[in-house]
Amino acid sequence: MNSRKTRRKLFSFFFQLPSVFLYTVFLIFPAIASLYYALLKWDGISEKIFVGLGNFSELLFSDRYFGTVLGNTFISMLAGILIQLPLALILAYMVFRTVKGFRFFQSAYFVPVVISATIIGLMFSLFFNPVFGPVNTLLKDIGMENLTQNWLSDPKIVLFSVILPGVWQYLGYYFIILLAAMQSIPKELIESAVIDGANTVQIFHKIIIPNIKGMIQVCIVINLTGSIKTFDIPYMMTQGGPGASSTFLSIYMYKEAFIDSSIGRGTAIAVCMLLLAIGVTVIVNLLFAWINRND
Amino acid sequence: MKKRKIKPEILIKYIVLIAVAVLMLYPLFWMGISSLKENSDIFAKPFALPTDPKWENYTLAWETAEVPLHMLNSILYAVSAVIFTVIFSAMASYVIARISTGRKIYHYFSLGIMIPINAIIIPFILIFRRIDLLNTRQGIILAFVVTNLAFSIYILVPFMKELPAELEDAAMIDGCGRVQTFLRIILPISKGGLATVGTFVLLNSWNDLFLSLLIISKQDYITLNQVCYNMKAQYVSDYGLISAAVMILVLPVLVFFVLFQKQVVKGMTAGSIKG
Amino acid sequence: MKNRKLRKLMGLGLGTMLALGTITGCQGNGEERDVAEETKADGSAEGEVPTLRLISWVTSSDPKTKPTYELIEQFAQEHSSEFKLEHENILGDELKAKIKTDIASDTVPDIFIYWGSGGNSTMLLDSDVIIPFDEYLDESKEIKRDLFPEESFSRTSSNDTLVTITTGLEYGVWLCNQELFDQYGVELPKTLDDMLAMSDTFNENGIIPFAMGSKGGNPAHEFVAEILGQMPDCEKDFENLTDNYTIDTENIRNTLDIIDTMRENKLFPSDTVSIGDWDQQFALYNEGKAAMIYAWTWQIPNMSEEMAEKTVIIDAPKMPGGTRDTSNFTRAGGDMGYMISKSAWEDPQKHDAIITLMDYLYSTDLQESALYNGGTIPARMDVEIDESKVTVPMLSEIINYAKGKESCPNFPQTCPKTECWTDFADGFDELFAGISTPEQVIENIDNSLAAAKGN
């Protein structure tokens, strides 16, 4: 080995060291410890009892709510990638092709992102108040009284009432990322397309989409994993109720681990969240690898 | 000058864009007007502008929330978290993206964006206790840094991969060492990416509640967000006062974003988009 | 290529080893330091001042508790030669998460406010996190059992062992907005039938007859207990829950049926989750949108002067099957008190300082400050209430109405296992929202209780 190689290795090692070290000690170790907790029956105080996969089989086979909770989480994930991301993409394209007011729209759409999710949850729980909340008041004022709803206690509706604020809040987040991606497309590509007579829609799917595919992939991954972790807004609005109608995996985990003190069960739910997140990430990556290959 | 006719589709586009902007801004606006009202006004006339603006809400919020102290805490934690996260993740990303081009270590880090912090909080806190960092400023800063590292590297690596190699090579030929190259060349040209990462770390830290509740609960150390949360007592809530406190909380980050939006947006470009 | 991979692996391995080293290393340091502290304690304890960690709901961020917070600070300063105070605040249900995380990671605060009810405290007592409160009372020169109402102790005990004493008393009362009743020509209700009869009139005029909601079981669970409290021998139903892990009794069935009838007759707001939790339930009444409320005194500081003038207290309307004389029935509550960490108590350095601080936390000074600034009804019976200094509207009136009347337990206090409480909360949420029948609610809660019993 020559000294240059050694130096390079030393350099690589020391430059990665702080991140690898901190990340491993403070995130990966606790995560591994959690995997272990998930195999226990433990309330955080008393003796730890090893139950193997007992917590998981209990969740899967005899838990009254787990199915609903899993379903809710899937719906929230779908809302993210089928509603939020497409909206963000379309808005980003519209703003991208706009000259006047560009900066205004760009900042305006990002404003909700800077507010803490707890506050957003608190605010929307006031908005949806059936008696004095603005939503029902507005519906009554414009004569659509029959559209007023029990936004937070009708089990058919509540799930959407708690998903909506999150879709709204983080729309701007994806909007900004996608807009930035569009801006980095070489101008000539678009100009030449315009000269060739391509219309707005054609430019969108012939030039924009293929060029920002990578970023769309990143957005999908962040969005899906984010949906799995979502906690603050629904917890502030309904605490997951009534029943489990608006409970997501993260809320269920929190209730089990911290309100009920079943740390083992709670952690088992957390492990399910982690597996789900890894699963969808792998699927998305495979999907995009396949798309790229077929291009 | 001849008057240009506005095409209908452009008009529609603007109507849509403006409608969305209103939707996006309205809740903040609502919070703003509520911060000048009494509880009863908020409930009775939620849409109305305050007839008799209650500016006392702000003075009261400022005093009871001890804004200067807690805002300084928030700024200290968020800014330190940003600095450390950005430096550490830039160093690691540089190596991963340009020297060892490792997929495995990159995957190892991207695992981190999937781990919900709530899920690992007990062993997490246990470590903090072991090294005696509970209820310390260093502790909360460290917590913010480690929880943001994975995401930062996830964003920065693809970004750095796309940087032109020529500059770096030139610097190396000029006899700069790796460290020199990193400091003089890589950091300045990655400004955009660093700004993006910095913004998200800033927002995450500024708005964090869960970690702060568990790591720092000493009155002198708590953040402005924690104070706002404390104001929403379980049994009795003065929403006008809380709204005022929230406005005070939101304003600094809002100003920050408007000032730096060009940097922030730029940072999300180039590198990360190649599939 | 291979070389690179190898190097990366090596790097990782090294990093991990270093990490492991640091953790174990730090553990070692910690132990050493503990030893050092102990030797110091054995030697001259005077030089070192112990640090006491206190968690309370008395925060400087709330104008109502700020004066009390400052009194505690001042007290700590005056006693700075005895201890150094670290005062922390975690409000609301997050306190549960905080304490549980602290316990699991072995950082229990020395003194902390917590729910004394059996469902919350049994776990802490059984696993030696806290001391039986009598150990403190025996040593304290200032705070004695007989300063506090005997009947409050059942709310802060776990299987007959006192775990704390409530810092304040609370009462649950039925309030009516007299103005609305006059306006629509409705008599104040005396029975369930009266209540059902008034429902239509108020609903037609856009008024919610009765402010009630259920989010995470709040405030519904107190209301369920209130109705159950009218049933014959209801104490037995509560005991049965604690001892036999079931709520499947005739009285409880009857109670849930009554609530279902109320819901069907639209006495409650339609969206009970949204109106759930204490603040929104009370706001509904306070803003004149509801004609009646079953409210607790911790909500009263929220009442406007204007509403206080319109409000009258009524005896609980009689429920079918109820045998209680409701004119002599006002449920009392208050189960939050300071608990003492066992390990801190056994630490000779902290022991005396804990007594000093606890004595102050239960002193008349603080009780008065909490009463006059925040409207907390003093638990100590030797506090003379000066009505002219009570700033919270109606509070004196309620105290005079409620004092000394019959009471009955509630569910958090009789729920036998901590882990069952969310099932109660979920059950009540579903019942009030009308998505589960009383039978289903009982069945679900009983299933959870049965499962918990086995553990």
Image (spheres, coloured by chain):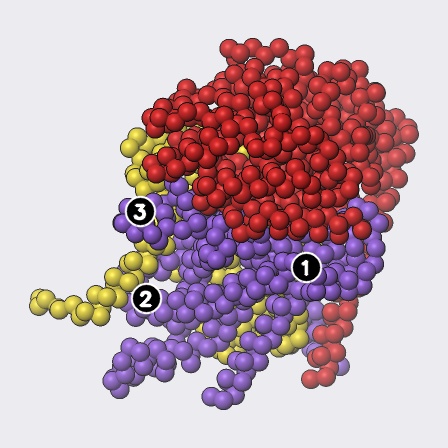
Q: Which mark is residue A140?
A: 3
Q: Which residue is mark 2?
A: A95
Q: In the rendered structure, are the residues bearing label 1 and label 3 in contact, judged by CB atoms less than 8 Å apart? A: no
Residue of label 1: A63
Q: Amino acid at mark 3?
A: Lys
Q: Are marks 2 and 3 on the same chain?
A: yes
The furthest residue to the bottom: A294
Q: Which residue is depicted at the point 66% across and 34% down?
A: C410
User: Secondary structure under badge 1?
Assistant: loop
Of B69 and B171, which appears nearest the observer? Answer: B69
Which residue occupies the foreground of this view, A159 or C195? C195
Task: Answer yes or no: is residue C96 visible.
Answer: yes
Quick one: which chain is red?
C
Q: Is residue C406 left or right of residue B20?
A: right
Residue C81: percent from left, percent from top: 75, 21
Q: Nearer the viewer, residue C234 or A148?
A: C234
In front of the other: label 1 or label 2?
Answer: 1
Q: In the rendering, at what x and y percent does residue C162 appear?
A: 78, 28
**Residue type, numbered disc 2:** Val
Q: Earlier in the sequence, mark 1 or mark 2?
A: 1
Rounded to the nearest angstrom, the CA distance separating label 1 from label 2 is 47 Å
Left or right: B74 as drawn, with respect to C414? left
Q: Colour of chain B?
A: yellow
Circle 1: residue type? Asp
Would you call the spot at circle 1 few (<14 residues within 10 Å), some (14-19), or many (20 or more)? Answer: few
Q: A265 or C84, which is in the foreground?
A: A265
Q: Residue at position x 40%, y 53% from top?
A: A111
Q: How many marks?
A: 3
